[in-house]
Image (cartoon, rainbow, N blue to C red):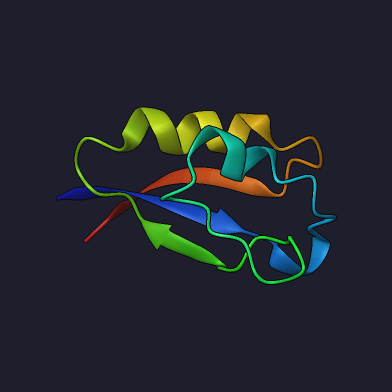
């Protein structure tokens, strides 16, 4: 079975928060305005939002990948 996963190079986040603006529930921010997580498995139905959030990042530190179980 294939799962969609989001990978975030958190250390390279500069705090533009564009991912959060697109999908707040998927890309939470810490108290300083930087992405608060390093990645997650995308729930069914959230695939479009996950991809939009990744594309919104101007630094391109967010990637969406398919992985086999």
Q: Residue at x 71, y 38 (%)?
A: 57
Kindly indicate the quadrant of the structure image that contains residue 32: bottom right
Q: Which residue: 48% across, 39% down?
A: 23
Count the marks: how many? Answer: 0
Q: Is residue 11 found left or right of 50 in the rendered image?
A: right
Viewed as shown, does residue 3 lie left or right of 8?
left
Instruction: Where is residue 41? Give x, y as percent.
Output: 33, 57
Q: Is residue 17 above or below residue 32?
A: above
Percent x, y of residue 54: 58, 38
Image coordinates for residue 69, horizontal then vertical, percent:
21, 61
Query: At which x and y percent is residue 14?
Result: 85, 55
Farthest residue in the left direction?
Answer: 1
What residue is rendered at 41% in x and 50% in y? 25
Residue 5, compared with residue 58, is above or below; it is below
Residue 21 sits in quarter: top right
Q: Identify the residue at the far front of this view.
A: 31
Above or below, 31 against 39 in this view is below
User: Measuring 22% from the left and 35% from the top, which residue is drawn there?
Assistant: 45
Is 7 in front, or is 32? 32
């Amino acid at each position: 079975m294939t799962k969609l996963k989001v990978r975030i190079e958190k250390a390279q986040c500069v705090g533009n928060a564009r991912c959060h603006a697109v999908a707040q529930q998927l890309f939470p921010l810490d108290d300083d305005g930087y992405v608060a997580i390093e990645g997650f498995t995308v729930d069914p139905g959230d695939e479009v939002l996950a991809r939009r959030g990744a594309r919104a990042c101007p630094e391109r530190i967010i990637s969406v990948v398919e992985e086999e179980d």
